[in-house]
Image: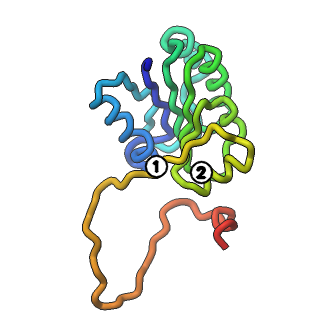
Amino acid sequence: MGVFYWFLSNNENQASVRMQSIRLHRLMVAEGYHSEMIQKPDFFTTELLLNRSEQSYFVEEILQEGDVVAIHKLNSVKTTFFAELVKSRNAHLIYITCDYPINIHLTPYADLVVVPSKKLLEIYQDSGYNNVQYLPDAPERFINPKINDNNDQLRCVWFGTYDPKKWESYT
């Protein structure tokens, strides 16, 4: 395997980036693989931060046939242009996402789309994409469960953006 290059939408502060990409990168490095973070901004973005000239330089001068480019949650037109360049170099492209709606622009270029839920896998497959793999998020730490002896009411907190469409398939 060649070099593994990561282009992320954020840093460790975003749970999905931390669990689905940064942890894998660190494990790969620990196991002796050549893995490099190219984009890991201190803010959330759906944009690839390289301009077209920088994209071309990366693909023509750095990326080699057989290398792997992993794109996490970046879904702009600029990212699609970059995906075209990556594929023209005969490199592998992995798109990691946990968001709905599905990315119909980038997915056709990906050798593999990684999703953390069976429902999202089903949505991609129902849309005709077979290059999708379900990989559940691993817990960041293990703790023993606490038994509620007081029969207190369970309270839940939602993290993320509220969008009624996310709940349509669950009602």
Badge 2 vs badge 1, beta-carbon distance below 8 Å: no
Quarter of the C terminus within the rendering: bottom right
| Sequence-wise first label, 2 or 1 | 1
Comparing 39 with 19, the one in front is: 19
The quarter of the picture where residue 117 lies is bottom right
From this viewpoint, is residue 144 visible?
A: yes
The quarter of the picture where residue 111 lies is top right
Quick one: label 2, few (<14), some, or many (20+) residues within 10 Å? few
Q: Amino acid at mark 1?
A: Ser
Give residue 165's position: percent from left, percent from top. Answer: 69, 63
Give residue 96's position: percent from left, percent from top. Answer: 54, 40
Q: Amino acid at mark 2?
A: Asp
Quarter of the N terminus within the rendering: top left
> Considering the numbered disc 2 on the image, is that residue within a helix, a strand or a loop?
loop
Residue 99, numbered circle: 2
Residue 16, numbered circle: 1
Q: What residue do we see at 46% from left, 49% from top?
A: 16
How does the figure colour the protein chain or chains? rainbow
Give residue 70's position: percent from left, percent from top. Answer: 51, 31
